[in-house]
Amino acid sequence: MSAVEIVVTLSPSGPRFLSDDSEFAVWAAGLGEERDAEPVTLTGPLGHVTPGEQLHCVGKYAEHARYGRQFVVESFRAVLPTSAAGVELWLTRRVPGIGPTFARAIVAHFGAENVFDELDRDPERLREVRTKAGRAISRKSVLRAIEAWREVATIREVETFLFTHGIGAGLAARLVREYGPDVIDVLTHDPYRLTEIRGVGFKNADRIAQSLGFELDDPRRLRAGLRFVLQQAEADGNTFLLLPELWRNAGRLLGVGDPDPLESAVRALAGEGELVVEGERVYRRQLWETERRLGELLGARARAKAVELFDEQIRPDVAVSDEQWSVVDLVRTRPLVLLTGLPGAGKTHTQRVLVDIARRARRRVLLCAPTGKAARRMRDLTGHDAMTIHRALGYSPLEGFQRDEAHPLSRDYDLVIVDEASMLSLDLADALFRAAGDCHVLLVGDTDQLPPIGPGRVLADLVASGVVPRVHLTAIYRQAARSLIIQSARRINGGELPFFSVAEAHAVLGADAELDDDFYFVSRSGPETTLDAVLELVCERMAGRGFDPRTEVMTLVPMRRGPVGLEALNALLEQRLNPGPQQVVVAASGLRVGSRIVQTKNDYTPDREVMNGEVAFITSFDVEEAEARLSLDDGEREIVVPVSALATYDLAWALTVHRSQGSQFPAVVAPWSTQYAVMLSRALLYTAVTRAQRLCVLVGERRAVAMALGRQEEHRRNSALAERIIDG
């Protein structure tokens, strides 16, 4: 059968299926440009195309035994719409400042067939446009659209280039933002620079490079592959790779069996100062310098002479245990102290006592944490102001950290207390201790939780070094002992199955034990029944326990993909918890008015600063201005965000356990399936359970829980910080 050519409009709701490598996808689409066009199912290399996009596809129709008639795509390219309705829809989705009224007026003024040619020639002509009633478009919208059109035109040019080389257009806007007007030159002459952009990956860059004639053993390809392998290792938390690991991973990526050309590439990169080879370890130079400097800073603090921060005669006004008081006494004289402990052991009470004593001694205290959620929780629990470490260090995206050795924190503070210190990555810890100056520092954390997102495991390495004074609180206090969340978390920490019900707990602790019914297990045999149980719990049964399923319940999952993964759950929970014909705000990510969303990176923009991991609701959307109003779940702020800035937000009815670090929620529902086998670990389960404040429900298979308990280390991280602290 000869190839068939069709023009389709992809569904605005995203693919029906996406493979694990994000290459193969199944899409619902309509033939042509119209919204009510004849439906067609597309399959093929469509993992990187954009929802709502129009494609010219070449392929063949086929009959699938289970799914029926499909169009199997062999190749495709983007096309611009030609109908009035298609052009209007394209303008409103792609050009900031153009809403539906403005779009209709543009098409009426220029004609659908002329819009792109006329505005590419002179976007200033948008000033001529009037509504059907003859009114001028708002000056703000016109200026924004004129400014945006030039970027949009460049994006279209990049899209054409990418399609020519077999890559979907979804990447184009990111490339234009990164490289500006030089983007086509970069893609043509140095395509491997694409690996600099997080999430782009080596495959896309390599596909372009090979279509341009780059050979498999081209030194530029080998160097790019080595850089990418090291970047991936850092994303997994490693500060370096051992040479055998590097050869194995790079050889697999590049298809190179002989290590000689790779060794030559490493020597060249080391000679240029980009890599550091230290024995069997290979580092990116920046990370090597950071690890070495931080090791020296921490080692110097560990060996520093005692300096009295406040008088030992100042005593607390509340009861405190001997081990809790030992923390206060250590902080009084030592420049660096570690406070660790299990849930319910009194870490927060110890911090409150320390802050009160320090302030009575007229010492200036800074409370901070790695994330905004953790800082707010610290403030709520201690009763004292707290902030993120980034804010304490005066971070700005353009200038970096303003506090450092030349402008230390000790100008304004005497004592720094850092909560959730298990989340400290190497880079953030380095910035903190470079700026600490003469401050006494107390790091508070739980080494049994997940390691930080980012390279390093600073708190664990400090503990492992053995040279920094540490108090590990173990006693469980009466109120905490009533909680099955606390009891089960401690059992998980010790490698034991949690109490799956109050009855199980009474069988072990005694029938007269006072216990809260705040943790239980719902047994299900597979992913489909687990999914159904999660939806029923969150959307129906939680309300009966007094929890608002929209604002007080969080579903925590180990993985993004899969039948009970983050993406599937968020899509289904969005339908159930935000039903009806809600206004679409960002079609590509399924965001609508009423959606619960999470910021996935730090945004320091004045008037809309939102940190990675913060959750919000979209409360309204101004179509003409292309702006959404968000209500942050701290209950304290509302902000207005342009649609373009919502690209860093995802649906947040469910979060991954990793992203939930530093947060707590009134109620947590955690599906636990053997489908997650590759990710399951004791630290993951422990972290998920300890995110719950008043109720935690595990749903799924006991075998999966046992599997997690049997994996004490989630993932071994390559780090040499502990030995550098000892040597420093």
Image (cartoon, helix red, strand yellow):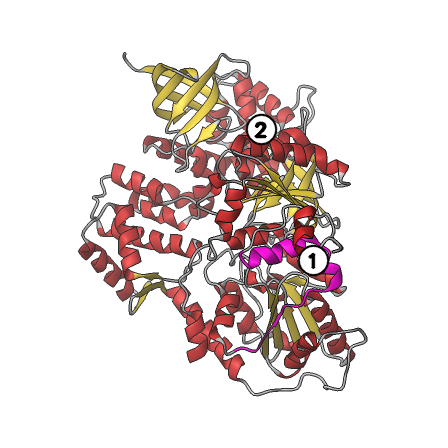
In the rendered image, which quarter contains the N terminus?
top left
Q: Give the range drawn in magenta.
A: 468-495
Left or right of 175 on screen, residue 75:
left
Q: In this view, does 13 lie above or below 474?
A: above
The quadrant in which residue 269 appears is bottom left
The one nearer the camera, 597 or 663, is 663
Q: Name the residue under label 1.
A: 377
Q: In this view, does 264 lie to the left or right of 301?
A: left
Query: Residue 706, relative to residue 119: is it above or below?
Result: below
Magenta stretch contains residue 473: yes
Q: In this view, does 655 lie above or below 357?
A: above
Is 22 inside the magenta-drawn segment? no
Along the line of sight, the residue nearer the viewer: 177 or 669: 669
Image point (76%, 80%), residue name: 362
From the image, tell me which residue sits under label 2. Answer: 92
Residue type at mark 2? Thr
**444 shown above or below 611:** below
Q: Position of residue 4 (x, y in %)?
A: 33, 14
Q: Distance between the residues labelled 2 and 1?
A: 40 Å
SS at badge 1: helix
Residue 427: x and y in percent read 49, 64
Q: How crowded is mark 1: few (under 14 residues within 10 Å), some or many (20 or more)?
A: some
Q: Report the residue at 37% width, 48% height from top.
A: 195
Q: Is residue 489 visible?
A: yes
The kind of residue on which mark 1 rests is Arg
